[in-house]
Amino acid sequence: MINKIKSFFVNVVTSDNFQRTQFDLTSIVIVILLALFFLPIEAEIGFFSILIGKIAYVSIGILYAHISRKFIFPYINFEKERRWDNNVMIILWYVVVIYCFAHGG
């Protein structure tokens, strides 16, 4: 069991997705640490509530956009699609759904 958990984390850390998002994660951690040390206590409460709220809304928007796209447009495979208008439609679907969720659901 421990070997399975260990191999899972090794696969996650060495995967292409982690390498791709490593800069983003590092930037977010640096911004949060700077805010912890340099903002006054009154500003920290508002800053972190807005940050957590926006992260939650955008994350839920990404999940909803992906799941709804798979149900509504299952015939469009983004990597293998030859028609550019289908790819643009999928990109706009993601942008619109995430934008709507980020502005309050």
Image (tube, helix red, strand yellow):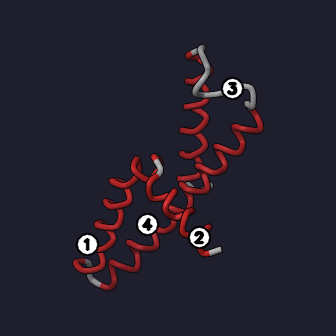
- Which of discs 1 and 3 lies nearer the camera? The answer is 3
Secondary structure type for disc 1: helix
Q: Is the residue 80 above or below the residue 14 in the image?
A: above
Distance Cα–Cα, label 2 vs label 1: 36 Å
Amino acid found under the numbered disc labelled 3: Ile
- Which residue is disc 4 drawn over? 51
Among numbered discs 4 and 3, the one appearing first in the sequence = 4
Distance Cα–Cα, label 1 vs label 3: 43 Å
Among numbered discs 4 and 1, the one appearing first in the sequence = 1
Q: Residue furthest right?
A: 71
Secondary structure type for disc 4: helix
- Which of discs 4 and 2 lies nearer the camera? The answer is 2
Q: Is residue 10 left or right of residue 44?
A: right
- Which residue is disc 2 drawn over? 3
Q: Could you say where residue 82 lies in the image, as x and y percent from the top left?
A: 59, 15
Residue at 69 percent of width and 37 percent of height: 69
- Which residue is disc 1 drawn over? 34
Q: Could you say where residue 2 lies in the image, as x and y percent from the top left?
A: 60, 75
Evaluate if marks 3 and 2 touch, with contact meaning CB atoms under 8 Å apart: no
